Image: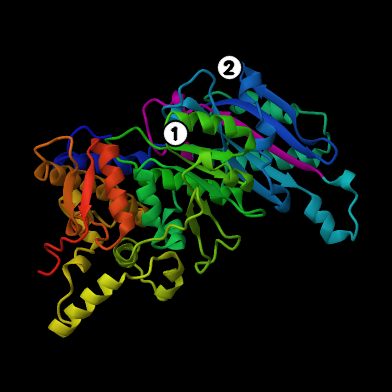
């Protein structure tokens, strides 16, 4: 975590660097290629694999369980799909994302074609294959939080490669695959694909709109470095779920802090031992999985995000639960913050706020009473203090010294604003919390620092939410190793 507060000049510089990093993603060398198959008699099998000749990695270790990672549960319900996956390196401590190999594969089958032609399917005719490559992020010249997005560069070439190999119909001839590794393995540039349709750094605004106010809930869990698993429902896009995992990992990133939360793509029952190791070391992660059985292994995670099958509809409800099955929802304050975020960063509006009501906590009686008193006493002309300071542009202006440019020459202007918003919000929270803790430090260092309810509002949180009170208690220990006590009955600052 940050050792000291970040001043404005450093923040402006780091923010500029953070945005530039998006444009500096480079292709990483391919260190291995493989072909896996789902066989109706044998199940998932590794058909063929080969490492780059210049790589001295243990081939057996690097391709271990690759047939399960690239053919995850439920993928047979899709005609084709892309899958990202993570392979822990041997004899590594897994303290950062460079302690993993990352890979991407393309899955394709002909079974659904037969269903449309024949009433009965000869299972021997059904072919399900997945072809993929593996890269090593430790080979990048310098740390870049966006570097894993280079996986998107391999999607179109892999799609063409597998389609051509299957069209040849020579199941035991891997010359095409061998030639691909010879031509593009190592640091050789990939083939240029016109009208490439895949990219990983464009979709954050879409995810923010789909999650609604719950995006703040997830952001806070990442700040606490919790162990989070996203469950992808059967038949849903693995590619979309992988992108979600990628973007969530970036929300808590700041340029001064290279110690990002672990990002684990497509974990399953074969990764249980590794997840236990991370838990023993108290290492937080954000992982995605198709194996719902992992939910029963409550010792492996802290929170689970359950995506609905109809996730691409805004009205679909996303469920966030603890490992004990308790639902976690966004606060009332976050619901208001979200509307402002959409207005100021996405330049839109929420036409039907009721869409997000299922994912927001109900208003407390105390807040309802105080809201009513303000409305009666001021004839609705003055808002309570706890409903002020919601302008997202203030966060952006605080971080930049002035409002960031609209980036008219960029197609990802909304993306830049969103990243800056969460980037600045994290540092603002860090600086403000450290100042408050120092100002309220007890003479007895062994006693907790006592804060008022209104302090939560000063920190950009909901002063009526027990969830946010618990959050700031945990965060104070996580960041500063300081114990905090919230005085729930002190309303100082709430009525003026």
Seen from the viewer's position, the closer of residues 319 and 248 is 319
Identity of the residue drawn at 22% across and 56% down: 456
The quadrant in which the N terminus is found is top left
Image location (x, y in percent) of residue 432: 17, 47
Secondary structure found at label 2: loop
Secondary structure found at label 1: loop
Q: Quadrant of residue 161?
A: top right
Identity of the residue drawn at 21% across and 40% down: 13
Dot 1 crowding, Cα within 10 Å, few <14, some 14–19, many 20+: some
| Side (left or right) of 206 relative to 182 | left
Is residue 135 inside the magenta stretch?
A: yes
Image location (x, y in percent) of residue 304: 50, 49
Mark 2 and mark 1 lie on one chain; the one further toward the N terminus is: 1
Seen from the viewer's position, the closer of residues 476 and 398 is 476
Q: Quadrant of residue 352?
A: bottom left
Image location (x, y in percent) of residue 496: 9, 69
Seen from the viewer's position, the closer of residues 264 and 16 is 264
Identity of the residue drawn at 36% across and 71% down: 349
Q: Which mark is residue 57?
A: 2
Label 2 or label 1, whichever lies nearer to me, is: 2
Q: How is the image coloured?
A: rainbow
Is residue 396 inside the magenta stretch?
A: no
Image location (x, y in percent) of residue 412: 38, 53
Q: Quadrant of residue 131?
A: top right
The residues tagged by marks 2 and 1 sit, at their Cα atoms, a distance apart of 22 Å
Judge whether residue 235 can be spotted in this image. yes
Q: Which residues are magenta?
A: 127-149
Q: Which mark is residue 26?
A: 1
| Side (left or right) of 169 relative to 489 | right
């Amino acid at each position: 975590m940050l050792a000291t507060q970040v001043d404005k000049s450093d923040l402006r510089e780091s923010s500029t660097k953070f945005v530039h990093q998006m444009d500096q993603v480079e292709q990483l060398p391919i260190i291995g290629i493989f072909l896996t198959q789902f066989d109706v008699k044998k199940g998932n099998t590794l058909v063929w694999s080969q490492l780059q000749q210049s790589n001295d990695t243990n081939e057996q270790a690097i391709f271990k369980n690759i047939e399960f990672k690239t053919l995850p549960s439920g993928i047979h319900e899709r005609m084709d799909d892309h899958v990202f996956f993570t392979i822990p390196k041997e004899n590594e401590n897994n303290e950062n994302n460079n302690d993993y190999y990352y890979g991407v594969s393309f899955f394709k089958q002909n079974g659904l074609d037969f269903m449309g032609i024949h009433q009965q399917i000869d299972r021997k005719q059904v072919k399900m294959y997945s072809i993929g490559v593996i890269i090593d992020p430790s080979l990048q010249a310098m740390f870049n939080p966006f570097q894993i997005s280079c996986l998107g560069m391999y999607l179109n070439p892999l799609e063409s490669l597998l389609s051509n190999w299957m069209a040849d119909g020579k199941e035991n001839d891997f010359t095409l695959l061998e030639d691909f590794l010879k031509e593009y393995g190592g640091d050789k540039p990939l083939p240029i694909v016109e009208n490439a349709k895949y990219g990983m750094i464009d979709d954050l605004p879409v995810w923010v709109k789909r999650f609604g106010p719950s995006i703040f809930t997830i952001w806070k869990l990442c700040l606490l470095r919790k162990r989070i698993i996203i469950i992808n429902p059967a038949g849903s896009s693995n590619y979309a779920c992988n992108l979600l995992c990628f973007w969530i990992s970036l929300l808590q990133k700041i340029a001064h802090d290279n110690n990002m939360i672990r990002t684990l793509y497509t974990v399953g029952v074969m990764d249980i031992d590794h997840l236990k190791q991370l838990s023993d070391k108290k290492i937080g992660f954000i992982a995605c999985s198709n194996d719902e059985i992992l939910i029963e292994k409550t010792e492996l995670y802290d929170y689970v995000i359950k995506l609905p099958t109809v996730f691409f509809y805004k009205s679909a409800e996303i469920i966030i639960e603890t490992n004990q099955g308790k639902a976690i929802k966004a606060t009332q304050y976050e619901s208001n913050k979200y509307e402002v975020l959409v207005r100021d960063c996405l330049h839109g509006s929420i036409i039907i706020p009721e869409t997000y009501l299922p994912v927001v906590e109900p208003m407390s009686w105390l807040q309802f009473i105080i809201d009513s008193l303000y409305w009666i006493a001021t004839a609705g002309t003055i808002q309570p203090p706890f409903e002020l300071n919601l302008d997202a542009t203030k966060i952006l202006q605080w971080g930049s010294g002035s409002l960031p440019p609209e980036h008219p020459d960029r197609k990802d202007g909304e993306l830049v604003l969103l990243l800056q918003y969460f980037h600045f919000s994290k540092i603002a929270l860090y600086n403000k919390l450290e100042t408050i803790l120092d100002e309220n430090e007890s003479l007895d260092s062994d006693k907790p620092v006592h804060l008022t309810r209104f302090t939560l509002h000063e920190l950009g949180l909901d002063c009526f939410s027990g969830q946010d009170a618990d959050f700031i208690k945990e965060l104070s220990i996580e960041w500063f190793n300081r114990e905090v006590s919230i005085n729930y009955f002190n309303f100082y600052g709430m009525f003026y």
